Image (spheres, helix red, strand yellow):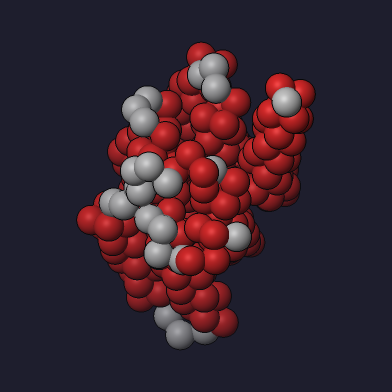
Amino acid sequence: MNGWILAATVLLTAGGGAALWGVATGPLSRRVVAQNLSTTVICPSLLLLAQGYGRTSYVDLALLLALLGPVGTLVFARLLADELTGDRPAAWGLTWTAAGVGAAVVLVLCAVTGPSRAMVKLLVIGALLISGNVVASRALSGGLRGVRDG
Amino acid sequence: MADAVIVVALLLTAASATAAVATRDPARQALVLAVLGLLLGVVFTVLQAPDVGLSQLAVGSALTPLLIMLSVRKVRRRGKEGDK
């Protein structure tokens, strides 16, 4: 077990446990935020696992998750719009903390990889992850008019 | 010690599966199922089966919640029409 896998384990335990607790208990607004958080936590841990196992092809999993995770949250934001109108879920502190963790992981991995095509891929994953997370959070908190009214 | 990440992933999956069973409302169940899909993807990855994990992530994170939420919506609409 090397340091990368240890870091992935710690991130998975802390973030995954918190997301699971949030999604299984409490009001609906908190559950949706926790579902969004789970994507933001698991994607960096997949990147760390790819580095830990030394297989660059595992990075594709994180790329797919960074693409499809926010799509899943947008599905909930759209189809639960009626039930979420009462209390708008807004957890910007949590959102930016999770985004910061993702950015830190991506930057560290970039520094290890060095300038190459793999580094470009990592940067793309990081950009997709953070922008998708912010867009999903805005949709949940009612910032996107199309999601709320459509 | 090297298996710690596998143990953690399996425990989280078991906990989320239990939570999915214990949740009664279908809409909330879909949220737990989305997290369960992600965790299953992690389990497949740490067991060195990234191809299975790839398809599991694709299906579990977006497709299953979409199908369940659309079904719930349709059933609720039909119920409302039946009341009238």
Q: Position of residue B22 (x, y in %)?
A: 51, 14
Which residue is depicted at the point 48% across and 66% down?
A: A145
Quarter of the image with the C terminus of chain B is top right
Quarter-of-image position of residue B46: top right
Q: Position of residue A87 (x, y in %)?
A: 34, 43
- Residue lying at the far bottom in this picture: please name it: A115
Task: Judge from the rendering whether residue A12 lies leftward or rightward of residue B18; answer left or right.
Answer: left
Quarter-of-image position of residue A22: top left
Above or below residue B3? Residue A95 is below
Task: Judge from the rendering whether residue B30 lies leftward or rightward of residue A36; answer left or right.
Answer: right
Q: Position of residue A128 (x, y in %)?
A: 50, 70
Quarter of the image with the N terminus of chain B is top left
Which residue is depicted at the point 36% across and 38% down?
A: A30
Above or below residue B61? Residue A55 is below
Q: Position of residue A57 (x, y in %)?
A: 63, 61
Which residue is depicted at the point 57% across and 38% down?
A: B34
Above or below residue A98? Residue B60 is above
In this view of the protein, which residue sits in the foreground, B29 or B17?
B29
Task: Judge from the rendering whether residue B36 lies leftward or rightward of residue A31; answer left or right.
Answer: right
Q: Is residue A147 visible?
A: yes
Which residue is depicted at the point 60% across and 26% down?
A: B26
- Residue lying at the far left in this picture: please name it: A93
Quarter-of-image position of residue A12: top left
- Residue lying at the far top in this picture: please name it: B22
Task: Judge from the rendering whether residue A144 lies leftward or rightward of residue A74; answer left or right.
Answer: left
Q: Is residue B8 visible?
A: no
